[in-house]
Amino acid sequence: MKKSLLLLFFLLLVLPHNAQEWRIEPPSWWTGMKDPSLQIMLYGKNIGKCEIKADIPGLQLKSIVSVPNPDYQFLNLEITSEARPGDFQILVQSKGKTIHSFPFALNERKSGSAARKGFDASDMIYLIMPDRFANGDPNNDSMPGMTEKADRNAPYGRHGGDLQGIIQHLDYIAGLGATALWLNPVLENNQEHSSYHGYSITDFYRIDPRLGTNELFREMVEASHKNGLKVIMDMVMNHCGSKHWWMNNLPSPDWINQFPAFTRSNYRLSTIADPHASEYDRNLALRGWFDLTMPDLNLQNPLLLKYLIQNSIWWIEYSGIDGIRMDTYPYPDPEGMKKWASAVMREYPNFNIVGEVWFTDNAKLSYWQKKAPNLNGFNSCLPSLMDFPLTFAIHKAFNEPPGWETGLQRLYDILADDFLFPEPDNMVVFAENHDAGRVFEYLGKDVRKFRLVMAFLATVRGIPQLYYGSEILMAGDGTRGHANIRQDFPGGWPGDSVNAFTGKGITRQQKETTAFISRLFNYRKINPVLHYGKLVHFVPENNVYVYFRILNNRAVMVLLNASEEERELPMEKYNEVLNLFSSGKDVMTGKDIPDLTRLKVGAMDAKIIELN
Ligand SMILES: [Ca+2]
Ligand SMILES: [Ca+2]
């Protein structure tokens, strides 16, 4: 007997008309996945009243789920070990006649797919806002069917940057010492305006045509791998764009969180872990909309949750990415997100996911890391966190006079909280991103302070992340609008008078900074002590912060002097580590340091010493 037959009968009530939209999501899947279940969403006028036929060997229909809207049908399938790769058809029939045929592919997994290794502390992540980095294909700046057309003069408009532009500059990025790329979301954002940032997704299975195509994204991942760069895909599960294709015709009213009138989230994320929080506040945090144009997805709807879980797995498997950065992590239903994270990690046990969990203090943040010993037993299953408390500490620490808890002591104190985190080494450390401002601006454009910050990021525990343009001291005040911190990268557009890729027209200070970052992170790239070494730090004195990273018999010593005076250090203080070593080498100058009993560090300067 044939193992696989889908034969479903539904009474035909209304004939679907001809010119209509048909959708099948996901459009393909794979054999050999750990989880053999598959949910297919079919969309078409009155498809819920049609008969669906598919004859795919090895595919078993487990159930059909009807939803209130007859324009949808959900199939629950199991891909048995008998299934073989191939291209198939799923037929929609009415009165015995086929009125539509959905192509559906079952593909073979690439070997090693399940074992792929995600990003970790050995990586340095370079964050790019794709619309603002490089325009490699001026022909796709404005595209038919996409409402918003390119306008490079509009601060919140589409500027034309794209995936091809990134592909053309992978060697430049790798040259900085980066080993991973994080791109702000690249899926279709067919909104009327301000769609350049990518966080209002209108099609979860399509790369925005102004950035490229699904195929090009896959090529970009492959080309990145060839350049020694992993790719981290930015995903959003809390909301979609108000112009998402399903918004005019939802499968069920509870697909999104709805209120009688527009209701904004209170953004009070503390209510989620707060044992004393009222239901009112917590509900508003989780179910209120992030913005007028960002309808809040209801992950308590099991069909939607499964849809989104599969969507993430589909992109991993299809494109070959190495990690996920999940936007607005605490805002959707926490149990749904937990199921999502565990499903992804079950399928790819060595993968990594970093969540944007925006808190300024460590206690609230630590609730969200996998295996945190929370009082209520909640385990997010989320491996990595964006270390926002450290970011905000960096913004202050280098700008204030030292005191009991100010100056570099602020950094020490933040790291002293690491007892709260099950895995502090798996936190992403950063001084700036597309939301949190340009650090050069915060530092009053003091390049000495900027170097101190970079030296700190390259040597502290965790996974460092830079933001495109850090290396040329891009500045801008984010509090006066996001456009100020999402500028076009000079040289990314044909005809740019300044070109940071080639060095044409950039200042000497910018050139030196690029060289500094490149040297620093290329050194970090090859030294596992800075990836996995234990951090031992000393309480700062006179605004000089000294710490070590120690791995096996190797160590790196870091001295950060944020004072305006050169300091000679009382070296005997560090003997618990230094006793094991007799000499060192200054990593940035390459000079040998034969005597470790006397060390000086210049005003507003950093020293990184490899100990021998
Ligand atoms: Ca373009
Ligand atoms: Ca929400």
Image: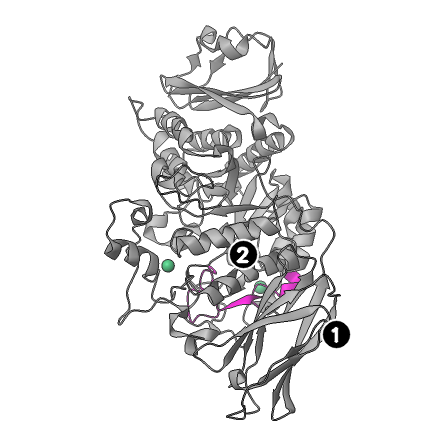
Q: Which residues are magenta?
A: 190-216
Residue named by callout 1: 2
Give the class, few, some or many, for how many residues have Cα within 10 Å of label 1's Cα (few <14, many ≥20).
few
Per the rendering, the mark at residue 282 is none
Residue named by callout 2: 130
Which residue is nearer to you in this view: 431 or 318? 318
Residue 142, quarter of picture: bottom right
Q: Residue at x 50, y 54 (%)?
A: 340
Does residue 590 appear left or right of residue 203 in this picture? right
Residue 50 location (% of width, % of height): 56, 86
The N terminus is located in which quarter? bottom right
Residue 202 location (% of width, % of height): 48, 69
Q: Indicate the secondary structure of the residue bearing disc 2.
A: helix
Q: Is residue 68 above or below residue 136?
A: below
Residue 493 location (% of width, % of height): 57, 58
Residue 141, quarter of picture: bottom right
Q: Is residue 114 magenta?
A: no
Does residue 536 appear left or right of residue 5 in this picture? left
Does residue 435 appear left or right of residue 577 in this picture? left
Q: Amino acid at mark 2?
A: Pro
The nearer-to-camera label among 1 and 2 is 1
The C terminus is located in which quarter? top right
Marks 1 and 2, how far apart at CA: 48 Å
Q: Residue at x 63, y 28 (%)?
A: 527
Report the predominant secondary structure element of the magenta stretch. loop
Q: Residue at x 62, y 16 (%)?
A: 553
Is the residue indicated by label 1 positioned so its CB lies within 8 Å of ligand 2? no
